[in-house]
Amino acid sequence: MILLISILFLPIGVSVLLALVGMAYFSFYLEAVFLFFLSDLLYGVKEARLFNVVFVSFIAALICFIILELLKKKLRLHRQ
């Protein structure tokens, strides 16, 4: 709920920080990826530098999620 409220009302930096902390702390935090998809649906515009892709934060969150899931065994924040 906190991440949803931050995506809707707070600057993107706060949301990114909360999502990264959540992805590192919880074992499978796919909610962050879905919420950034919601963010792109609500606030996304075409990015000319990235071949007119609208879902920039969704793609970035998905890449971060995959990388963190692959490296999670080596992170100290991972709950076992």
Image (tube, helix red, strand yellow):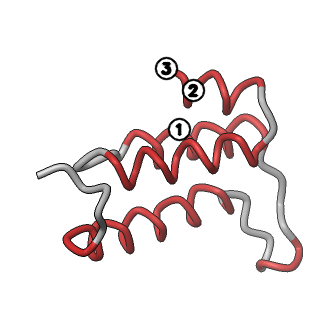
Q: CA distance from mark 2 to mark 3?
A: 5 Å
Residue 4, position in %: x, y?
57, 26
Q: Is residue 67 above or below residue 4?
A: below
Residue 64, position in %: x, y?
48, 67
Residues packed near mark 3 inside 10 Å, few (<14), some (14 to 19) or many (20 plus): few
Residue 18, position in %: x, y?
56, 42
Query: Do the numbered discs 2 and 1 sit on residues whose CB atoms are within 8 Å?
Result: yes
Query: Do the numbered discs 2 and 3 sit on residues whose CB atoms are within 8 Å?
Result: yes
* Residue tagged 3: 1
Secondary structure at numbered mark 1: helix
Q: Is residue 56 above or below residue 17?
A: below
Residues packed near mark 2 inside 10 Å, few (<14), some (14 to 19) or many (20 plus): some
Given this view, does label 3 or label 1 mark the residue nearer the observer?
3
Name the amino acid, label 3: Met
Total numbered circles: 3
Name the amino acid, label 2: Leu
Q: Earlier in the sequence, mark 3 or mark 1?
A: 3
Q: Furthest residue to the right? A: 48
Give left or right: position of 67 versus 8.
Answer: left
Q: Earlier in the sequence, mark 2 or mark 1?
A: 2
Q: CA distance from mark 2 to mark 1?
A: 7 Å
Give left or right: position of 49 versus 80.
Answer: right
Name the amino acid, label 1: Leu
* Residue tagged 1: 35
Residues packed near mark 1 inside 10 Å, few (<14), some (14 to 19) or many (20 plus): many
Q: Nearer the viewer, residue 76 or 28?
A: 76
* Residue tagged 2: 4
Q: Is residue 41 above or below residue 33?
A: above
Q: Quadrant of residue 41?
A: top right
Secondary structure at numbered mark 3: loop
